[in-house]
């Protein structure tokens, strides 16, 4: 089987949400699998001058309108969330904990978290909201709750983020296939071209 596509995303990223609704369909079309990786941008990725991502860039009026327009273009449900942006460490830890045990369950959880925030307007920074989502998916509420504070899960998430940095990941969504990086939901067309015809 051909190499998988690595998909890096932050749960606070609207472009990550849009990509999450498309990447598996694209991959399946070309016989690829997708490895999902939750990262936390505003905790680890600091551009020049200390301006944080996504809190500085993603609050602009242009981005707000662009996400609305892009969601409509791709026919993906979207409602501007509030508060925005927010911290996603707990969601990322829960995802990592699930991913180490069952990647398919983790992917389902990721979809549910993204939709809870960008469609239903729920505050996914609150652990109670994340536990409600997990319970709705048939996951054990207590098991998921333990992942939020588990030292091993924290270390695993940090290692995942450190590896992302080492691989050149700097935003959400970010895709890597066969060593080639593609940044942004608007690069999905180029990614698909790569999958269809190989390197440029």
Image: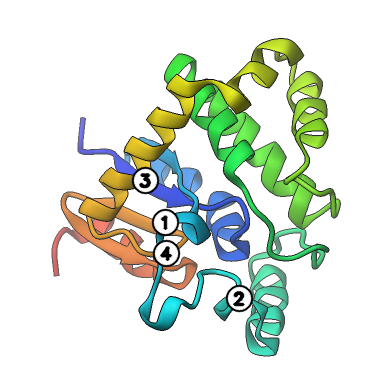
- Which residue is identified by label 3? 161
Q: Residue 58, which numbered label?
A: 2
Q: Is residue 35 left or right of residue 86?
A: left
- Between the C-alphas of marks 4 and 3, the distance is 11 Å
Give the structural element (helix, strand or loop) at label 1: helix
- Which residue is identified by label 4? 171
N-term mark: 4 or 2 = 2
Mark 2 crowdedness (10 Å alpha carbons): few <14, some 14-19, many ≥20: some
- Which residue is identified by label 1? 44
Nearer the observer, 36 or 190: 36
Quarter of the image that includes the N terminus: top left
- Between the C-alphas of marks 3 and 1, the distance is 8 Å
Figure quadrant of residue 58: bottom right
Q: Taking 143 as reference, is 53 above or below it?
A: below
N-term mark: 4 or 1 = 1
Q: Taking 176 as reference, is 98 above or below it?
A: above
- Between the C-alphas of marks 2 and 1, the distance is 16 Å
Figure quadrant of residue 181: bottom left
N-term mark: 3 or 1 = 1
Mark 3 crowdedness (10 Å alpha carbons): few <14, some 14-19, many ≥20: many
| Percent of width and height locating residue 179 | 16, 53
What's the coloring here? Answer: rainbow
Which residue is drawn at the image coordinates 38% and 59% (left, top)? 174
- Between the C-alphas of marks 4 and 1, the distance is 11 Å
Give the structural element (helix, strand or loop) at label 4: loop
Q: Taking 87 as reference, is 102 above or below it?
A: above
Asked if the residue under mark 2 is in contact with the one under mark 4, i.e. CB atoms within 8 Å, the reply is no
């Amino acid at each position: 089987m051909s190499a998988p596509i690595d998909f890096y995303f932050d749960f606070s990223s609207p472009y990550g949400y849009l990509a999450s609704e498309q990447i598996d369909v694209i991959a399946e079309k070309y016989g690829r699998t997708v490895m999902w990786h939750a990262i936390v941008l505003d905790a680890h990725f600091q551009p020049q001058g200390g301006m944080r991502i996504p809190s500085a860039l993603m609050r602009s009026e242009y981005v707000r309108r662009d996400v609305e327009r892009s969601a409509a273009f791709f026919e993906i449900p979207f409602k501007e969330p509030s508060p925005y942006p927010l911290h996603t460490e707990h969601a990322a830890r829960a995802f990592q904990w699930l991913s180490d045990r069952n990647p398919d369950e983790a992917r389902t959880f990721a979809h549910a978290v993204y939709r809870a925030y960008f469609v239903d307007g729920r505050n996914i920074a609150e652990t109670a909201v994340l536990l409600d989502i997990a319970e709705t998916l048939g996951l054990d509420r207590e098991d998921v709750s333990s992942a939020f504070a588990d030292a091993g899960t924290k270390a695993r998430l940090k290692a995942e983020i450190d590896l992302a940095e080492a691989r050149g990941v700097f935003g959400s969504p970010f895709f890597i296939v066969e060593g080639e990086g593609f940044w942004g939901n608007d690069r999905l067309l180029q990614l698909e071209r790569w999958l269809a015809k190989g390197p440029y």
